[in-house]
Amino acid sequence: MAASYRNEHVIVGPHRVVTDWLGQRVTAVLMAAFAIVVLVRLLMPGEFGYARWVGIFSAPWMKALTCLAGLALLWHAWMGVRDILMDYVKPNGMRQLLQAASTAWLLGCVGWLVWVLWRL
């Protein structure tokens, strides 16, 4: 009898599923908390315009919180895109190319966020 060999690498295991599930929830809570902080700051009395936006995001603690929310968004989006690509893109080379492109794009977005925030 000939042995049957499959050239497949199992990526998914129970440990990754639980950590991904938890990571999605933690990052979602961080982003929701950030949205609430921004909403509260926007609802404070005053004229709405560019100067107000600069005032909201000029405090160092708000810059740090925004960077944390940006990193949470990066991680949340990366996990979601990775899972979608793993489920629906079957050719391994194409999936890896799309994952690399989406990772580069997300890192570029966070880099741009940090650059914009810290030059205010």
Image (cartoon, rainbow, N blue to C red):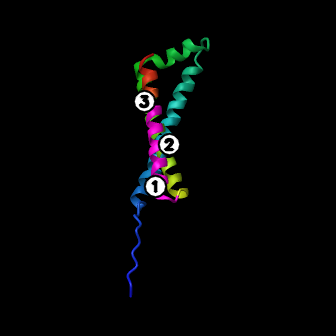
Q: How far from the left and from the top, in percent, is residue 23?
A: 44, 47
Depth-wise, is mark 3 or mark 1 nearer the camera?
Answer: 1
Pointer 3 with pointer 1, Cβ within 8 A: no
Tell which circle, 2 or 3, labels the residue nearer the N-terminal end: 2
Residue 99 belongs to magenta span: yes
For label 3, the SS is: helix
Q: Label 2 belongs to which residue?
A: 77
Asked whether, in this view, residue 43 is left or right of residue 112, the answer is right
Q: Label 1 belongs to which residue?
A: 93
Task: Name above or below for residue 41 compared with residue 71.
Answer: above
Residue 44 belongs to magenta span: no
- Of residue 118 and residue 3, the one placed in the foreground of this image is 3
- Of residue 26 and residue 17, the one placed in the foreground of this image is 17
Q: How far from the left and from the top, in percent, is residue 71?
A: 43, 35
Find the residue positioned furthest to the right: 48
Pointer 2 with pointer 1, Cβ within 8 A: no
Residue pictured at 45% horizontal, 42% vertical? 103
Q: Label 3 belongs to which residue?
A: 111
Q: Which residues are magenta?
A: 90-111
